[in-house]
Image (tube, helix red, strand yellow):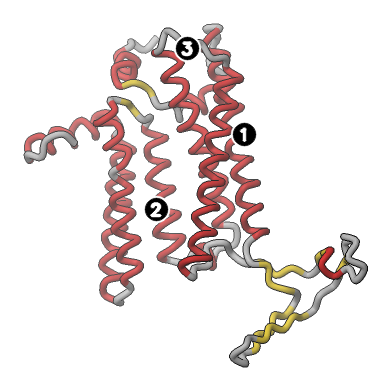
């Protein structure tokens, strides 16, 4: 926000409530929950949890910062979804261990992330396309760029997870128990013939220090399945929004009545602030 006086801050909050009351309520409730969670983590001396809570509070400010400094309007539904995604990923996922305790939690979030990133990518290109005279991009091109943008963000995140595992001793790329595989490494002829290993019941790991780890039910895959699963669901989310966005732009160009699919895309489209104001001022007919 520009300026830091209490009067300006109060006025800013009034404008936020007036423009998107539901999003502001979601923001306020989640912020209170994060602060309560931070107090709890501080009480039990979980400093990593305290840091995650502080990071979440900072991330909550990004939508407002973007709107204020770049003169754009984020639809209330989109904004509330961002807050809920941050809370689900950081507080529920990391602090409350939902990634471990709730099956499929990570998969759901990666799917939503693909959808959200496609919406962001589509909005950025659509804004330039509509407000720059030199650009006249087709709906298919807009959808393709949005899809590629979302997939790129997904790949970069997997790079971050890999770096966290390799350099900081984390386990961000979660492990899977695998009961069968095929590998050319086991080929005694060295002719790259894949040798299949089926129905693995147990593997034993022995370290140089003499420690032994027994894995029942198979062998431990250390990340590749999790990475490919995350990219696959990111693909699904990105493709879904790209299709909705394509339909929305096609109908907008032909001045057709907006269908349900196009309305879904419109609810996630970032607009220029003045343009959004004009839409809000249009009389209902």
Percent position of residue 171, x then y: 53, 67
Inspect this view and state whether residue 33 appears.
no
10 Å neighbourhood of mark 1: few (<14), some, or many (≥20)?
many
Viewer-side residue, 127 vs 7? 127
As helix, strand or loop, the secondary structure at mark 2 comes to helix
Dot 2 or dot 3: first in sequence order is 2
Q: Is residue 231 above or below residue 164?
A: above
At 38% across and 22% down in the image, what residue appears? 271
Question: Residue 87, labelled with which disc?
Answer: 2
**Pointer 3: what residue?**
135
**Circle 3 SS class:** loop
> Pointers 3 and 1 in contact (CB under 8 A)?
no
Q: Nearer the viewer, mark 1 or mark 2?
A: 1
**In the figure, is residue 209 to the left or right of 25?**
right
- Left or right: 285 as drawn, with respect to 29: right
The residue that mark 1 highlights is: 239
Q: CA distance from mark 1 to mark 2?
A: 24 Å
Q: How many marks?
A: 3
Q: At x 68% / y 72%, what residue is drawn?
A: 220
């Amino acid at each position: 926000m520009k300026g830091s006086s209490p009067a300006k801050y109060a006025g800013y909050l009034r404008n936020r409530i007036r423009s998107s009351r539901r999003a502001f309520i979601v923001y306020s409730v989640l912020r209170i929950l994060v602060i309560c969670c931070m107090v709890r983590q501080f009480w039990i001396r979980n400093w990593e949890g305290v840091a995650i809570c502080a990071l979440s509070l900072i991330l909550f400010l990004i939508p407002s910062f973007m709107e204020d400094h770049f003169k754009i309007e984020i639809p209330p539904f989109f904004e509330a979804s961002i807050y809920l995604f941050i809370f689900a990923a950081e507080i529920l996922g990391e602090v409350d261990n939902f990634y471990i305790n709730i099956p499929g939690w990570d998969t759901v979030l990666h799917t939503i992330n693909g959808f959200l990133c496609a919406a962001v990518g589509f909005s950025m290109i659509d804004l330039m396309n509509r407000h720059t005279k030199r650009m006249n991009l087709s709906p298919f091109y807009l959808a393709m760029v949005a899809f590629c943008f979302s997939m790129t963000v997904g790949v970069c995140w997997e790079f971050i997870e890999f770096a966290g595992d390799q350099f900081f001793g984390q386990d961000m790329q979660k492990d899977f128990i695998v009961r069968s595989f095929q590998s050319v490494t086991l080929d005694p002829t060295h002719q790259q013939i894949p040798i299949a290993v089926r129905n693995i019941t147990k593997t034993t790991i022995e370290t140089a220090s003499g420690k032994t780890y027994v894995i029942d039910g198979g062998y431990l895959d250390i990340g590749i399945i999790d990475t490919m699963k995350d990219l696959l669901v990111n693909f699904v989310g990105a493709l879904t929004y790209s299709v909705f966005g394509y339909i929305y732009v096609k109908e907008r160009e032909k001045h057709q009545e907006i269908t349900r699919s196009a309305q879904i895309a419109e609810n996630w489209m970032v607009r220029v602030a003045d343009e959004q104001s004009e839409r809000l001022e249009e009389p209902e007919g």
